[in-house]
Image (spheres, rainbow, N blue to C red):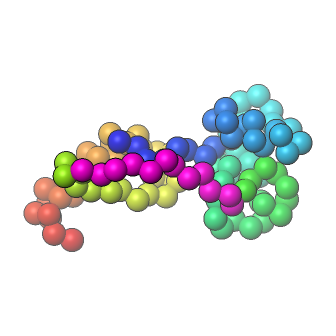
Amino acid sequence: MPLTQDHRPTIPRERERIMAQGIKLEPGQTRLNGLAVSRALGDHFPKEMNCGMTAEPYVSPAIKLNKRDSHLIIASDGVSIRWFSSKKLELLMAMLSYSCGTF
């Protein structure tokens, strides 16, 4: 179950937020000042360029975990852009199988 959302200029809510700041986005634009994300904690240069990037986080609603929830995958935007959640889960299961569950 995904706990977060992507923060890219191609996501409608992110496009609206960026354009509300007076930033012009071209149709199909996928990057802000060379980066494929629209929210970032680092990357000070693009934020200083007033290109629509922000460090303001999106906070997901709280969820209650249960006994069936056994792992949490924390990944950078680079991993999330390249792999869907199903692929990340597949890789996690392969790593657990290979390492017999110990890291």
Considering depth in this image, is 21 or 51 the residue closer to the camera? 21
Q: Quadrant of the N terminus?
A: top left
Residue 96 visible, this orientation: yes
Q: Residue at x 72, y 56 (%)?
A: 54
Q: Is residue 2 left or right of residue 77?
A: left
Residue 36 rendering spot, x and y as whole percentages? 64, 48
Q: Which residues are magenta?
A: 55-66
Q: Quadrant of the C terminus?
A: bottom left
Residue 73 rendering spot, x and y as whole percentages? 35, 56
Considering depth in this image, is 3 or 43 the residue closer to the camera? 3
Q: Residue at x 34, y 50 (%)?
A: 64
Q: Residue at x 44, y 57 (%)?
A: 75
Residue 94 visible, this orientation: no
Number of on-image labels: 0
Q: Residue at x 78, y 43 (%)?
A: 18
Dominant SS type (magenta) = loop
Residue 37 rendering spot, x and y as whole percentages? 64, 50
Give the vertical position of 50 relative to 27 (above or below).
Answer: below
Q: Is residue 71 left or right of residue 63?
A: left
Name the quadrant containing residue 99.
Answer: bottom left
Residue at the extreme bottom of the image, as rendered: 103
Residue at the extreme top of the image, as rendered: 27
Residue 70 rendering spot, x and y as whole percentages? 22, 55
Give the vertical position of 57 relative to 83 (above or below).
Answer: below
Q: Is residue 70 left or right of residue 83?
A: left
In magenta stretch: residue 60: yes
Name the quadrant containing residue 49.
Answer: bottom right
In magenta stretch: residue 62: yes
Residue at the extreme right of the image, as rendered: 22
